[in-house]
Image (spheres, rainbow, N blue to C red):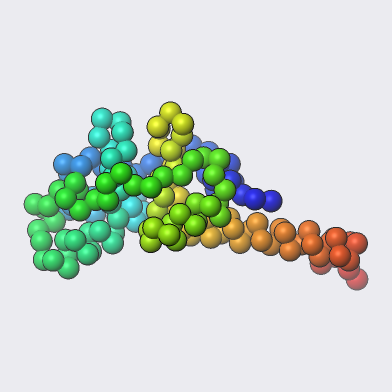
Amino acid sequence: MQRRIVPHIVSGPREVARIGPSAAVSEAARRMRERHVAALLVMEDGRLVGIVTERDIVYRVVAEERDARAVTVREIMTPDPVTARPDERAIDALDKMRAGHFRHLPVVGEDGRVIAVVSIRDLHEAVRESLEEELHEAESYIHGEPYGLAG
């Protein structure tokens, strides 16, 4: 079965970790730590305007020895991030991430509302499960019995 982002990966409402663009990077880091996430969606007036990740903080603030209390999220975020649709196949979302070299993908509905953020780990797991199911179905078809139940 080809897994879709909704409902196979995102099966219910999720509170999305977010921050405003004018917030200090130190606040973004604190929020990531509190929520146990590696990315925050940057929202302005209810609209997705960017994404900021741990990697952004390390590369664009820490490695450059900038003051995380003085640098704003807007200065280091990736503006207008690539997004996925809820009905998108997991494999297609994974291809977007691989092509763009990023690890987090906002899922946005037709109305522009952010539904969730999926990670590369979420998508790998969904694709792995799909491949396992396809393998079991092929084994059952070839052997004429449920895979793994032969005596």
Write down the quadrant of residue 16 in the picture. top left
Extreme residue toward the front, this view: 99
The C terminus lies in which quarter of the figure? Answer: bottom right
Q: Please indicate whether residue 126 sits to the left or right of residue 13 in the image.
A: right
| Count of numbered circles on the image | 0
Residue 134 in the image: state x and y as whole percent: 72, 59
Q: Residue at x 79, y 62 (%)?
A: 138
Q: Residue at x 22, y 59 (%)?
A: 57
Q: Is residue 44 visible?
A: yes
Q: Please indicate whether residue 35 sits to the left or right of residue 126 in the image.
A: left
Question: Please, is residue 27 above or below residue 103 in the view?
Answer: above
Q: Residue at x 16, y 50 (%)?
A: 75
Q: Residue at x 24, y 54 (%)?
A: 29
The one nearer the camera, 124 or 19, is 124
Residue 43 in the image: state x and y as whole percent: 28, 38
Residue 25 in the image: state x and y as whole percent: 18, 52
Question: Please, is residue 34 above or below residue 113 in the view?
Answer: below
Question: Please, is residue 33 above or below residue 87 in the view?
Answer: below
Q: Is residue 36 visible?
A: no
